[in-house]
Amino acid sequence: MKEVADISTEHVKLDKGKFQVPDWLFEFHGHKCPYSVMGYRMGIAALRELGREKCHDHDMFVFSEMGVGHPQGCMQDGIQASTSATFGKGQMFKLFYGKVGATFFDPSKGAVRILFRNEFMDKLGTHEFFSFRKQGIEPSQVPANVAQGVIDLVLNAAEEALFKIERVPDFKFKPAQSSFNKAKCEACGEYVFERYLRVKDGRLECLKCSGHTQDETTLYLPF
Ligand SMILES: [Zn+2]
Ligand SMILES: [Zn+2]
């Protein structure tokens, strides 16, 4: 494996060949871990593949294949940090496939799927950092030099060693129509946006008061 990142793009800040991430990534994420850095790099790779900058508004969507109960979920914070396609702006969706991949979609540029390569996952997993993690020690409690060591492994890797990148032709996604329309639930009096109002006994009620279950657990399944 090459020791020096060999990617050259205006999106990537390189210092003597080493990929750099901003300090605020860890401030935002809460601890220093390899997966937040891996996600940051994945987002940068996606922006380059799609030929675009990070998004200011709602012009890019991310479909994360990650689930719950595995530590790679930290990558999703890195992805949000480098692309600004955020959960809050309605641009990050989780598919719960339990795979460490994500599809990045820009309606004007198409879609690209990026997968964390098996080989690098195996290599990373042998680092001392994970022997601490497997003992139940949280990332912020792992000795700083160990955490920095595993982060450096990710920063120094060549992008092609980290990721498999493939175009996804004919990818389609229509985001939910944004609406400011709302009404007060006729049972609890709390405001509800119209998409979530239900009719019960002729009254407009919120999901909770009407006894309806949430029907938007899966908005979109691309594969
Ligand atoms: Zn983390
Ligand atoms: Zn209600």
Image (cartoon, helix red, strand yellow):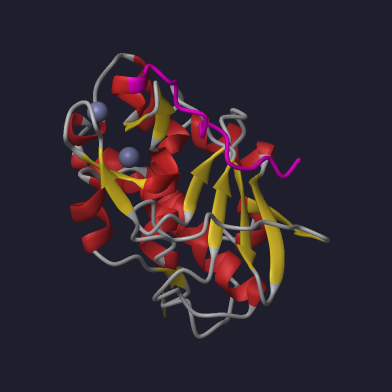
Q: 203 above or below 173?
A: above
From the viewer's perspective, tell me whether residue 214 is left or right of residue 163.
Answer: left
Q: 201 above or below 181?
A: above
What residue sits 39% from the left and 76% below the top?
56
Q: Position of residue 34 (x, y in %)?
A: 39, 44
What residue sits 37% from the left and 68% below the top?
20
> Could you say which is closer to the camera, residue 123 or residue 84?
84
Toward which corner of the image does residue 219 lie, by quadrant?
top right
* Bounds of the magenta segment: 210-223
> Could you say which is closer to the camera, residue 41 or residue 188?
188
From the viewer's perspective, tell me whether residue 145 is left or right of residue 175.
Answer: left
What residue sits 62% from the left and 29% below the top?
97
Residue 15 shows up from this direction: no
- Image-quarter location of ligand 2: top left
From the viewer's perspective, tell me whether residue 204 is left or right of residue 127.
Answer: left
Q: Position of residue 55 (x, y in %)?
A: 44, 74
Toward which corner of the image does residue 19 lie, by quadrant?
bottom left
What residue sits 46% from the left and 35% below the top?
72
Classified by dominant secondary structure, the portion drawn in magenta counts as loop
Q: Is residue 74 magenta?
A: no
Toward which corner of the image does residue 113 lie, by quadrant?
bottom right
- The quadrant the N terminus occupies is bottom right
